[in-house]
Each structure stands twice: as structure tokens, then as C-alpha cells.
Amino acid sequence: MSAIPPFVLIVEDSTDIALLIQAILNNLGVESHHASDGIKALDFLAIRQPDVMLLDIGMPMMSGWEVLNEIKNRWPESSFPVIVLTAFEDPANKLIGKFQNRVFRYLTKPFSPDILMETVRAALDRG
């Protein structure tokens, strides 16, 4: 009997980036689901909680920070780590993340597949 593979929720408004991430995760033996915006991510979280979430910060309609606040309000007992994906390297964004206790690590776009794999593995090991 095989073990259940880890599950990652990818919240990313760029379909191309999400497909690349899914291909990398498949190579790790990780299942994933892509939500193209924060609202779809929250709808999905009502059904299934991931082992790790990859969360873009700069999305239309609802920023990644707003998604994290909603998760904290709706599911305060959830504890999955979040890897923040951002094109912004400014210290202000990282400071905001310090107030979010579930932010595991930041990945600045563009990132290498190796860095993504290493970061996801570390987040899964944490859980």
C-alpha cells in the first residue's frame, strides 16, 4: 500500500508560472492544485487543506496578504506552512510577512526549479 503523496495548493494568477510549478512538483511526487486568484483559493480551502501553500502576493482582486488574513479568520486552527512567491524584493513586503506566523519562506520571482524543490521539501519536512 502506498503512502498518500503530499499536497500543495498553488495560488498564482499567472497560468504559465503555475504550470511550471506543477511540473516541478510532479517530479517531486507531490500532488497540486492551482487556484488562479485568492477567492478561488479560499473556496478550495473550504474543501481541502494543503500540506503546503505556494502563495503569490501580487494578485488582482485580492492580494496574498489578504488571503492570509482570511485564512487566519476562517480557519484559525489550520497550520500549513506558506511559501510566499513575489516579484517584490522590497523590505516592506518581507516585514508584512513577519507578522504572518505561517509564512515559511519567501521565493523571489524568477526562482530556479532547484530552489523551489528545496523550499517545498523543507516546508513539507516542517509539517
Image (tube, rainbow, N blue to C red):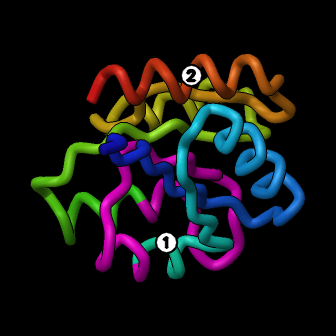
Viewer-side residue, 56 vs 100: 56
Viewer-side residue, 88 vs 33: 33
- Whole-percent x and y of residue 40? 53, 80
Q: Amino acid at mark 1?
A: Ala
Q: Secondary structure at mark 2?
A: helix
Q: Can you name the residue that lies furthest to the left here?
A: 77
Tell which circle, 1 or 2, labels the residue nearer the N-terminal end.
Answer: 1
Real-space Cα separation, disc 1 to disc 2, in angstroms:
21 Å
Locate the C terminus by quadrant. top left
Q: Amino acid at mark 2?
A: Thr
Q: Identify the residue at image location x=75%, y=18%.
A: 114
- Whole-percent x and y of residue 48? 32, 69
Q: Identify the residue at image location x=37%, y=54%.
A: 50
Locate the N terminus by quadrant. top left
| Residue carrying label 2 | 119
| 70 lies above or below 22 | below
Determine which of the numbered discs, if any, sits on residue 24 in the image: none
- Whole-percent x and y of residue 84? 56, 39
The region drawn magenta spans 43-67
Q: Residues within 10 Å of mark 2 (few under 14, many from 20)?
A: some
Q: Secondary structure at mark 1?
A: helix
| 42 lies above or below 15 | below
